[in-house]
Image: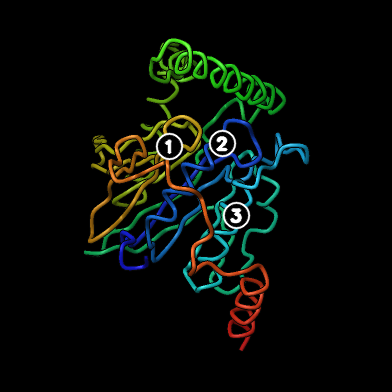
């Protein structure tokens, strides 16, 4: 099984929103079990603490957490960059336990002396900075729209034998102010990255997967956004000196009919804890 896993040098995931109805955890698990990353960057909004409810925490959500912790316990360097939905973790910035780090931003040294500046991106959101109550209200409305979308998809597939549709995505892409916000977000990120001399700027937050070069009179930078695991089901992968955008919908090798069983190489909760404890002890020596 290990030999069949696709090797990835750096994996960037963001906006998974575990703990919400919109999270596509089963698809994410199939993806995670198909790859073998050397380094993992969790770029914000992994667990949606804003909307977290003990009444809704499916087994598949816990399996995502266990799979990532399984990687950590095996010594894979993992960076957690909190976003706005898991912002309470920002108070723990600087925390390290073995190969697990919590940071507010990250600069990675890549091949060919290139650098990537990675952060969640909510710092550019005016609503987040000045009206958090409005942002939270919008998050609740978005989650409700996802529920309506799921029901509409059920009717579309089972009754009319048609494909899935994304109401929230269509609404967002049709609103001019939303499109303008995305463009401004990307441009601002790129400009600051260019000013600091980075080759790449990597964000999440806006649920809009993208890889494109942005130029100003100061220079050129490659802007990247990992998207989300609610609508786009996407991530960023860096392998052999090149960034690529992974989309679950375009992965012909992914078979959703396969059951989500625990693989032989996955560790038990006790084994994960003992491995993490051993890593922590080695770090302290």
Q: Which residue is mark 2?
A: 23
Q: Horizontal placement of 142 versus 1: left or right? A: right
Residue 96's image quarter?
bottom right
Instruction: State the image coordinates of residue 220 (x, y, percent, origin top left).
Output: 24, 42
Q: Secondary structure at mark 2?
A: loop
Q: At 48% across and 68% down in the image, what residue appears?
A: 77
Dot 2 or dot 3, earlier in sequence:
2
Q: Residue furthest right?
A: 54
Judged left or right of residue 79, residue 199 is: left
Tell me which label, 2 or 1, sits earlier in the chain.
Answer: 2
Q: Which mark is residue 233?
A: 1
Q: Mark 3 sits on what residue?
A: 65
| Marks 1 and 3 in Cβ contact (< 8 Å) | no
Element under disc 1: loop
Q: Residues within 10 Å of mark 1 (few under 14, many from 20)?
A: many
Q: CA distance from mark 2 to mark 1?
A: 9 Å
* Quarter occupied by the C terminus: bottom right
Disc ID at residue 193: none
Q: Which circle's residue, 1 or 3, is located before the other in the chain?
A: 3
């Amino acid at each position: 099984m290990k030999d069949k896993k696709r090797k990835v040098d750096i994996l960037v995931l963001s906006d998974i929103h575990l703990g919400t109805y919109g999270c596509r955890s089963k698809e994410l698990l199939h993806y995670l079990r198909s790859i073998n990353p050397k380094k993992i960057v969790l770029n914000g909004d992994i667990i949606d603490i804003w909307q977290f409810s003990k009444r809704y925490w499916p087994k598949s959500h816990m399996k995502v957490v266990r799979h990532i912790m399984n990687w950590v316990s095996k010594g894979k360097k993992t960076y957690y960059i909190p976003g706005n939905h898991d912002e309470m973790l920002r108070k723990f910035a600087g925390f390290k336990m073995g190969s697990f780090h919590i940071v507010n931003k990250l600069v990675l040294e890549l091949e060919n002396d290139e650098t990537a500046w990675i952060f969640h991106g909510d710092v550019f959101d005016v609503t987040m900075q000045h009206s958090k109550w409005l942002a939270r209200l919008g998050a609740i409305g978005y989650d409700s729209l996802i529920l309506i979308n799921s029901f509409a998809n059920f009717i579309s597939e089972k009754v009319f034998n048609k494909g899935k549709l994304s109401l929230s995505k269509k609404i967002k892409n049709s609103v001019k102010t939303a499109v303008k916000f995305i463009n401004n977000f990307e441009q601002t990120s790129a400009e600051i990255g260019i000013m600091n001399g980075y080759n790449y700027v990597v964000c999440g937050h806006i649920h809009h997967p993208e890889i494109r070069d942005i130029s100003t009179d100061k220079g050129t930078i490659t802007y990247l956004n990992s998207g989300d695991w609610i609508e786009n089901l996407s991530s960023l992968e860096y392998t052999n000196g090149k960034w690529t955008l992974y989309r679950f919908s375009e992965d012909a090798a992914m078979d959703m009919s396969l059951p989500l069983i625990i693989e032989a190489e996955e560790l038990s909760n006790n084994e994960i804890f003992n491995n993490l404890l051993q890593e922590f002890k080695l770090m302290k020596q």
